[in-house]
Image (cartoon, grey):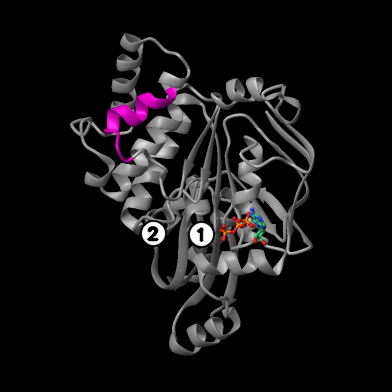
Amino acid sequence: MISIEGLRKVFRLNNDDIAAVDDLTLTIPDGEIFGVIGYSGAGKSTFVRLLNRLEEPSSGRIVIDDEEITTLNSKQLRLARQGIGMIFQHFNLLWSRTVEANIAFPLEIAGVPKQERQKRVQELIDLVGLGGREKAYPSQLSGGQKQRVGIARALANNPKVLLCDEATSALDPETTNAILNLLVDINKKLGLTIILITHEMHVIRKICNQVAVMEQGRIVEQGNVLDVFTHPVQDVTKKFVQQIMGPSDEEDDITNIIENNADGIILKLQFLGEATNQTLISQLAKRFDIDLNILQGKITQTQAGGYGTLFVQVIGEQEEFDRALSFIQEQTSVEVEVIRDVS
Ligand SMILES: Nc1ncnc2c1ncn2[C@@H]1O[C@H](COP(=O)(O)OP(=O)(O)OP(=O)(O)O)[C@@H](O)[C@H]1O
């Protein structure tokens, strides 16, 4: 649905050319929540601003829903922008207008008649959970409420795509979660494609299906979130994964676990993100005559399910253990390794 080919943006600064976005090629399917992650200066903001031509590309081609954005004249572009909503880190609200007047603003520009406008504003207020705050001014709202106004305003003209430029970076963790949940809700309800740029991996983990990692204006790694989590290739990607999973000092961990737990078999279970595996521990306890003791681990949740590693101690008869092991190997997609056998 969104196709980007050879996109490039060069800024000229003090006689130097800076390629903020450098030969970027990407396809984003319809209805996706697509994350772009990178450190400061990687070119994320420039990239997302090129998509609606808030920034003019130096070269390359952008096609959104069969419309070639890069060749539109200014009048055509104004119309096309109604189909591309955008929200910002610092909300960019009109401070002298109330909540409802902020949300009505893009409808006024699009020439929507007053009665229809009022109806649409109320729908949007309900959608983003701002009922009762219609007459408030932005200065009277919390950060999360301001972003809800930003989202409602961005959705006013029923866009097909929502661009989010660090939309939760100015919010505290709890409010961030609420806004991310709202974005997932909107994506499901409206089938909207969401492109979200961030420097925070937990934002990607929580709501994205696909992720692209940007460095120096280029996409250096891309794939579905779980693949990138489980097999990060580039150093920059490994650092982002560590933001969530912590540093991997697995060899030390295993030595410690074995030394500190004298009895039983020790298993390493690796969960690869399938929701169906999440009850594995209780299933093992119910189906087999074994006791399980969780020693150490870290599981994190992604859109596809839980991902991470658990070390468990198993106490019981060898025969029961063998049956439990076969069950894990044959009936689940959890990867299992016996790191200490009883002998
Ligand atoms: N208007 C501009 N003029 C000159 N250089 C610019 C301009 N906008 C961005 N740049 C440069 O382009 C590069 C990419 O900047 P961009 O803001 O897109 O990165 P970013 O990944 O969004 O980082 P941040 O999260 O810090 O905004 C940087 O080196 C920046 O200095």
Q: Is residue 242 left or right of residue 13?
A: left
Q: Is residue 224 visible?
A: no
Q: Quadrant of ligand 1?
A: bottom right
Q: Residues within 10 Å of mark 1 (few under 14, many from 20)?
A: some
Q: Position of residue 47 (x, y in %)?
A: 66, 47
Q: Position of residue 63 (x, y in %)?
A: 72, 29
Q: Is residue 92 left or right of residue 48?
A: left
Q: Mark 1 or mark 2, which is nearer to you? A: 1
Residue that protrudes farthest toward the left in the picture: 132
Give the CA distance from mark 1 to mark 2: 37 Å
What amino acid type should be assigned to the residue bearing mark 2?
Ala
Q: Nearer the viewer, residue 198 or 121?
A: 121
Q: Is residue 242 above or below residue 168?
A: below
Q: Which residue corresponds to mark 2? A: 285
Q: Residue at x 42, y 43 (%)?
A: 92
What element does badge 1 sit on? Answer: loop
Q: Residues within 10 Å of mark 2 (few under 14, many from 20)?
A: some
Q: Which residues are magenta?
A: 95-106
Is ligand 1 closer than 8 angstroms to the Cβ of mark 2?
no
What amino acid type should be assigned to the residue bearing mark 1?
Glu
Res. 62 image quadrant: top right
What element does badge 2 sit on? Answer: helix
Q: Position of residue 227 (x, y in %)?
A: 65, 53
Q: Which residue corresponds to mark 1? A: 200
Q: Is residue 254 visible?
A: yes
